Image (tube, coloured by chain):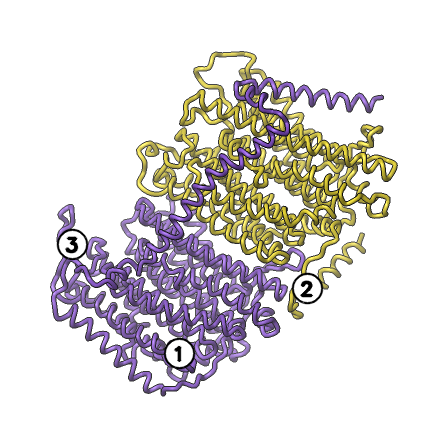
Chain colours: A yellow, B purple
Amino acid sequence: MSFPLLTVTAAVPALGAVATAAVPAARRTVAKWLALLFSLATLALAAVQLARFDTGAAGPFQLTESHAWIKDFGVRYELGVDGIAVVLVALTALLIPFVILAGWHDADPLEEARPNRRWRPTQGFFALILLVEAMVVISFEATDVFVFYIFFEAMLIPMYFLIGGFGDRAGEHGEEETAARRSHAAVKFLLYNLAGGLIMLAAVIGLYVVTAHQTGDGTFSLQEIIRARADGRLDMASSTERLLFLGFFFAFAVKAPLWPLHTWLPNAMGESTAPVAVLITAVVDKVGTFAMLRFCIQLFPEASKWATPVIMVLAVVSILYGALLAVAQRDIKRLVAYASISHFGFIILGIFAMTTQGQSGATLYMVNHGISTAALMLVAGFLISRRGSRLIADYGGVQKVAPVLAGTFLVGGLATLSLPGLAPFVSEFLVLVGTFSRYPALGIIATVGIVLAALYVLVLYQRTMTGPVKAEVRAMPDLKVRELVVVAPLIALLVFLGVYPKPLTEIVNPAVKHTMSQVDKTDPRPDVPVRAATDKDASHEEASHEEAEAAK
Amino acid sequence: MENLIGLLVAAPLLGAAVLLCGGKRLDRVGHWLGTLLAAASFVIGAVLFADMLGRSGEHRALHTHLFSWVPVGGFRADVAFQLDQLSMTFVLLITGVGTLIHLYSVGYMEHDERRRRFFGYLNLFLAAMVLLVIADNYLLLYVGWEGVGLASYLLIGFWQHKPSAATAAKKAFIVNRVGDMGLSIAIMLMFTTFGTFAFGPVLSSAGDAGEGKLTAIGLMLLLAACGKSAQVPLQSWLGDAMEGPTPVSALIHAATMVTAGVYLITRSGAIFNAAPDAQTAVVTVGAVTLLFGAIVGCAKDDIKKALAGSTMSQIGYMILAAGLGPIGYVFAIMHLVTHGFFKAGLFLGAGSVMHGMNDEVDMRKYGGLRKYMPVTFVTFGLGYLAIIGFPGLSGFFSKDKIIEAAFAKGGTEGWILGGAALLGAAITAYYMTRVMLMTFFGEKRWVPDADGNEPHPHESPKTMTIPMIILALGSLGAGAVFSINDTFLKWLEPVTGHAEGHSPVSALTVTIATMAVLVIGVAIAWSQYGRRPVPAVAPRGSLLTRAARRDLLQDDFNHVVLVRGGEQLTRGLVQIDHTLVDGAVNGTATAVGGLSGRLRRFQNGYARSYAVSMFGGAAVLIAATLLMRAV
């Protein structure tokens, strides 16, 4: 049996969570370093996954593991990654060390707190982060619907504690009010996602019943279901397929989040600490959009096409609505949350445009949005921790006293508004092109989002960073070394992936090709195909592809 | 030779990276480093130019492919460059004027503590602008296009502590983004129409596509050009952009960046040639803007804003020429280059005046400065003569050709366009004479400022005057050099194509008419500002004057329609999000799940207990599944 790389990649952070939680109360620093170490080990494993991933392989899934689990229900412990999953595992593993490092002091006990041996918030904070990482990683890797479902849902528990248990110190409303708001946000998060999860559970059971009924052998295995459908053993009635699709989609749309199921996100991101907010939007929410690509479209291709028009419209509404609300926010973190809603609209738009550019763009978007939001939000967190306020109006002229902080904040903002040259531009443009080539009107409306993005980012920058220096800001220190270590690599990555995204597109493209073949869609052809360069290149690529396959 | 092309961008980009990330250590040498790298880029450009001259017209273009940028299915964007005569012209203008302005800034920004950063931004601008003109496909052009927008944003807002500068910077970026939307959509249209957006294949097969598609692409490109080149209706940002340091106004907001729209239209000539409706839109925008800018320029007392109105107007001429098709492309670019010289020179002169006048920009507080700043006076004067089209100077040749071409458009359209261009020439003569008289002639009108410091006007240091002198020489001779033997025409024709129009009026008549309106414009200005002393406080003025002072109410319009409307909309949406969307979802959840009772409990602080019970539930579920397996 080969080395179970995928299991280990998920198990390491889980082990790390246990180890971190077990550190004695007085050894907080040890717990932090331990957590960081485990997250780095996970990153190394994700890098090994990337390295071992073969972009020319024939099958859709690689590094697969498969074991019988619950025989009576056909549940198998099946893992495998395609190009989309492997880059998202890498994104998760990449961001967690930064989240841990950025939140280094977020869970330190207050000085005036009574010494209490049994209450170990610091250990808990980092253990929970690692636990979330483990669950997210395995959600990306699972190819069995049931396994996916368990971890998709279980993720809510550590997230709930992270949102409800840790927040910014003393907000503008006072300690008690802040705690109440925090707990309200955590509950809202939980309820929304539980509701989605329950509906999905019904659909998961329904899927089992349908497969059991038709093939005689109930299964949750994605590959098995795809095979059964291909050779005609499984032929769902379209009404059944649609119902099941909706059950799955609802859960993912809550998680993603898609308008109008988005309102939990601003509360959750606003009330939690910046690193946890990054965890929510850059990591956990990606499971929702990822699952649309992997499960909704591949399990229910016909229903996906049936629902596409409505979903596309909702996605465009999300883009504009999120952006407009971001413009109106007075709270930095809520602004970033609404901006994320707008960005998730783009991701969903790309997925359901059902074009190569749209889906590749959406996948890249997930990665790039993760990095850019992390950069913007973590710097915002550093800013907020210095002044003790999330309100935009409490800042002004920071650029003068803390130029490095302001500079990195600006770069994060420019990435958020998809400036060409930075990574998000590539994915956003791909999504727009992919959408436009099938739905020109929606593509054009979505393009308005780029103007609104400039508006909310630059208004935020202007109000916080420029102008006369506010008295409360005057003594603000610039970024410390630890903070710079968090931000600098993220910015470097944004630049690198903006200039040279090819390593990513090469991994993602075959997976998107496979997904597109599941829904039986091909890209629209241009009106006046230009003979000269492009056709020759295309055939050349085909040839080199065949060569690669022949070589094996 | 091809390998050198990338260095044109790499040299200033390196400068930007080093200067912006280098930290305080570089404060003492940073400005010279930036200037050196700008000059390096110019030298490389000159070497490539010499090489290019060695080949015949059709074989001058160089192509180089660096790497595949975004390959996704049929979508292929490459980082690849194309250096033909059109690009070369821009490269020399950008790096040449750019280097001079770097040099000027060494003196101008001497006392600014953030001078290193200023040069970093200037280098960034050069890199992006060169990228814009040497890209071989529209998506890479887009990178340069927004890159210059970013540099412009950073430089307009360079004095960020001034709220007006920060606001102006933001405004410029956002208005430009509206234009960028046009560029995005144009590229998407090209992709769906041709399956590519590289210059070569798109432009060579433009004729095969339907006229409707081409018109749509053309209009979207025009929208992009309107944003970057401050043409009506996206003109509102340029006046405010004068908040930036004056060298920035000279380089970015006069000589180079704002002319990118003209480049875009000329480059896409093949598309416009096959889309007459789009061309009509282009000439309309050009004609309206050339009058709009000129009228605004007449009413401004702020020397930089008067020049900004003039820039808008002159670019209007170029856009007009570019919209005329093959009869105008060459002259659009020729005017662009001569304008690059004289307008950069005028701005540097204005900067020199401000430098000597404690940063005063109000021309009503100048007067008689020719005695105090002779070099500035002479160089500014040459720029002035060039822009009004004084016979023999640069502007005379290039503008005259555009007016001729406008008439040559033929039909009623030709008469309207030609008439607008002539009228514009008269107004140009008027407002530039006004600037000249108010600044350098008459009695001194300056007074001590609030702190009691009286300005002591003086000539600027050598680092500033040398660039001014070089640009003045360009204003003096460039037009003649370009026109002798139709040098410039022959140089560009292989790229842009050229056709002689059929003008209803002879070239001589046009020249005479142009001279006549020039004299009229100068005479009116003389009678108002030369014969009589200039009042230190602006008179109330006519309705038109007052409107022109407020940029013909552009901001009032935008404020009422866009800003107020937008505020109402977003505020309304916040309310809706809070009550309606959130409420509806919660309400549904409550109704469906009967959760209201529990909800209340959570809010009373029982949340933890619930989560624990959920965790317990999950644990039971997992235990049960494991158990099932065991059984």
Residue B22 is at least partly visible in this image: no
Say which residue label 3 marks: B455
Residue A438 is at least partly visible in this image: yes
A279 or B120, which is in the foreground?
A279
B80 or B139, which is in the foreground?
B139
On residue A537, the disc is 2
Q: Is residue A517 left or right of residue A411?
A: right
Q: Is residue A26 left or right of residue B419?
A: right
Marks 1 and 3, the one that precedes in the sequence: 1
Please tell me if label 2 and label 1 are on a single chain. no
Residue type (three-letter) at the residue carrying disc 3: Pro
Image point (75%, 49%), residue name:
A518
Q: Chain for mark 1?
A: B
- Is residue A41 depicted above or below A359 in this figure? above
- Is residue B323 depicted above or below A173 in this figure? below
Image point (37%, 54%), residue name:
B558
